[in-house]
């Protein structure tokens, strides 16, 4: 019995399109065929468990082999096999039931994944690399005859009696001239490692040499001999398929090493396991994140029933968790559809919020269970937490209880603890709490010391995300504002009614202002006289908090272009109550008074790292002449 026929498709010839269009992604043919083979073995197992197959199951396995001379790649399985009728039904017809739709839609598809899965063309991806494909198969059904099918990529096929003697299927690809690169051990091994490493059925690819004990030598030392054993490329039972109770920390760490061989150990992990309302398993790791986000991104691998699909999980995992590593496996994620569809998919949305919740719960547990250990990890996880609080409302609601604020003396506080700590000293006359922070403790040291002297605490906000984070919590917390420690002199950071009295008369104040204005002689620096604590520095240079934030936003492209174009403006606060100012007033020689003023101003600049170039040289020379 041999039959020829035409594949039932309404469109002339689909293969040239598949081949040409999908060329860049052509390695996925192996994923598709190996997955079909795995499915076939799982189906026979299922039939056996349902009592619909009573024969020997044998060692269920898939094998990938290649023959460089014959230019073939063969994917074999001992699954359920197909009868000739089933080939006609599943290969000839079913595959192309969507062909018309395919022809309409293929133009908008962006990659091979999209087309192949969406139109049930898994098997036909073989034609991306093969001139001719042959099936040899024997069905599990009693009395079934072996069947054979072949097709050269045109719409013509041939079907007839096959030669396979045991249950299962061989798919033989006659590799085309452009795809001979696939006839290579390392190339195929690489593709299998990528897509098939965790398939649930053993996949054999050639053999490897192992050493086996072989008695003892003449001196009684143990001997070994080389034996060829099957090279099974996959771990059929990866940790995410197991129950957390079966696993030890070591198992998680080993798995992490297997996925990311050159990475440092992760901080901790979350085992995901849901089956309702969607099905999802996986393990997500918190890596040690360096300040460079980008290199840590895109490390989560997405699987569907243990078949690797992609490491682009952008729409499935919330943006702020893109820094996590690990695997997610879900048959419920529509893998083969376009981006916009994925974003609108309700399962994807649920998965997204499930992951967010699990991560928040894990952090909360860690915080509650062992505060000290949590604080130790804070420098690494702080980034996730803050990023999450900024980008996801739901996460903010949970994280507000375990986010930590770190003071310059390295003590950590929760939001509530911090409020409690500073509210007595740092509430201003309008009942607003003022949190003071530094983004550069070395540069702002003199300001920090002045603030501490006044009994104020200064928070450390020097991670790349803190700028945004400050804005976010300021919005959320009631009656609370943030001021960078150098936004004003310490006496003025928090406006209270108890300002020290002026010791200068108005006339004297004007006189001092004139001396400083002419000594400094720079339009960007505006001199103002304040009556501060006599202990404070005689001169301080500050930039207004509002102005500075606007300029920072403009620099980051935040739409504050107007502020970005403004020149830097500084306030030069002269402490009228400081004894140096009195001395300047009493100095009769105008030149000497100006020199003193200039010296005090330069010292203020120096303490902030603002004194550079010729100004610095002039300062050094002046200082030398003064001592
Ligand atoms: N190795 C095999 N053993 C038994 N049946 C197979 C084998 N390969 C393919 N088939 C049959 O051919 C059908 C079509 O396969 P194809 O890969 O084109 O689509 P699919 O597997 O149903 O869907 P998709 O690959 O898009 O997930 C399969 O559903 C299966 O019934």
Image (spheres, rainbow, N blue to C red):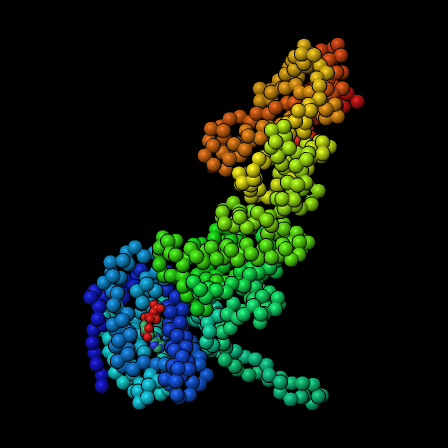
The quadrant in which residue 486 appears is top right
Q: Is residue 622 visible?
A: no
Residue 469 position (above or below residue 612):
below
The residue under the point 33% across, 83% down is: 139
Residue 207 coordinates in the image, percent (x, y) = 49, 79
- Residue 618 occupies which quadrant of the picture? top right
Going by the image, does 480 lie left or right of 173?
A: right
Q: Position of residue 251 (x, y in %)?
A: 59, 68
Q: Residue at x 50, y 30 (%)?
A: 564
Seen in the picture, residue 513 relative to 431 is either above or below; the reply is above
Quadrant where the C terminus is found in the figure: top right
Task: Examine the rendered structure and indicate whether residue 477 appears above or below residue 277.
Answer: above
Quarter of image, res 249: bottom right
* x 45%, y 58%: residue: 351
Q: Quarter of the picture for ligand 1?
A: bottom left
Q: Is residue 555 left or right of residue 92?
A: right
In the image, what residue occupies the spot 63% across and 55% down? 368
Given residues 358 and 4, the one toward you in this image is 358
């Amino acid at each position: 019995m041999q039959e020829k026929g035409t594949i039932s498709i309404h469109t002339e010839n689909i293969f040239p399109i598949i081949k040409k269009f999908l060329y860049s992604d052509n390695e996925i043919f192996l994923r598709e065929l190996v997955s079909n083979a795995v499915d076939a073995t799982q189906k026979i197992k299922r039939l056996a468990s349902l009592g619909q197959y009573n024969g020997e199951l044998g060692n269920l396995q898939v094998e990938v082999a290649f023959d460089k001379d014959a230019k073939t790649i063969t994917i074999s399985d001992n699954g359920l096999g197909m009868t000739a009728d089933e080939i006609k039904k599943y290969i000839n017809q079913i595959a192309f039931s969507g062909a018309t739709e395919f022809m309409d839609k293929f133009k908008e598809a962006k990659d091979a994944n999209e087309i192949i899965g969406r139109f049930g063309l898994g098997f036909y991806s073989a034609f991306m690399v093969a001139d001719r494909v042959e099936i040899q198969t024997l069905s599990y059904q009693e009395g079934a005859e072996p069947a054979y099918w072949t097709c050269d990529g045109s719409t013509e096929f041939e079907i007839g009696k096959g030669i396979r003697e045991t249950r299962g299927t061989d798919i033989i690809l006659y590799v085309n001239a452009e795809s001979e690169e696939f006839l290579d051990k390392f190339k195929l091994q690489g593709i299998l490692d990528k897509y098939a490493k965790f398939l649930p059925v053993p996949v054999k690819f050639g053999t490897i040499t192992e050493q086996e004990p072989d008695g003892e030598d003449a001196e009684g030392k143990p001997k070994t001999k080389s034996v060829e054993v099957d090279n099974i490329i996959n771990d059929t039972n990866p940790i995410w398929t197991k129950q957390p109770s079966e696993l030890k920390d070591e198992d998680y760490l080993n798995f992490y090493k297997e996925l990311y061989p050159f990475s440092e150990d992760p901080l901790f992990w979350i085992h995901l396991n849901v089956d309702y309302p969607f099905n999802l398993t996986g393990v997500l790791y918190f890596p040690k994140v360096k300040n460079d986000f980008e290199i840590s991104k895109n490390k989560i691998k997405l699987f569907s029933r243990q078949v690797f699909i992609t490491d682009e999980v952008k729409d499935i995992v919330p943006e702020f968790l893109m820094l996590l590593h690990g695997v997610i496996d879900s048959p419920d994620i529509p893998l083969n559809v376009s981006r916009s569809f994925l974003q609108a998919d309700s399962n994807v949305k649920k998965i997204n919020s499930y992951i967010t919740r699990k991560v928040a719960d894990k952090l909360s547990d860690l915080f509650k269970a062992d505060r000290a250990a949590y604080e130790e990890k804070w420098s690494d996880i702080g980034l996730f937490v803050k990023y999450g609080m900024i980008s996801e409302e739901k996460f903010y609601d949970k994280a507000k209880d375990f986010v930590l604020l770190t003071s310059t003396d390295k003590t950590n506080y929760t939001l509530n603890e911090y409020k409690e700590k500073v509210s007595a000293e740092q509430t201003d006359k309008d009942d607003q709490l003022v949190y003071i922070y530094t983004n550069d403790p070395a540069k702002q040291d003199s300001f920090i010391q002045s603030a501490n002297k006044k009994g104020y605490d200064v928070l450390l906000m020097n991670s790349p995300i803190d700028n945004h984070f400050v804005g976010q919590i300021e919005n959320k917390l009631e009656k609370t504002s943030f001021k960078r420690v150098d936004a004003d002199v310490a006496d003025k950071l928090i406006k209270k009614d108890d300002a020290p009295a002026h010791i200068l008369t108005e006339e004297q104040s004007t006189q001092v202002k004139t001396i400083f204005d002419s000594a400094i002689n720079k339009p960007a620096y505006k001199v103002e006289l304040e009556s501060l604590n006599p202990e404070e520095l005689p001169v301080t240079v500050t930039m207004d908090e509002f102005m500075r934030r606007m300029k920072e936003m403009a620099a980051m492209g935040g739409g504050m272009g107007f502020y970005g174009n403004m020149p830097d403006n500084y306030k030069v606060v002269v402490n009228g109550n400081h004894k140096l100012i009195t001395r300047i007033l009493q100095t009769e020689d105008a030149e000497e008074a100006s020199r003193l003023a200039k010296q005090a101003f330069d010292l203020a600049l120096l303490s902030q790292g603002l004194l550079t170039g010729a100004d610095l040289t002039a300062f050094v020379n002046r200082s030398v002449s003064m001592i």
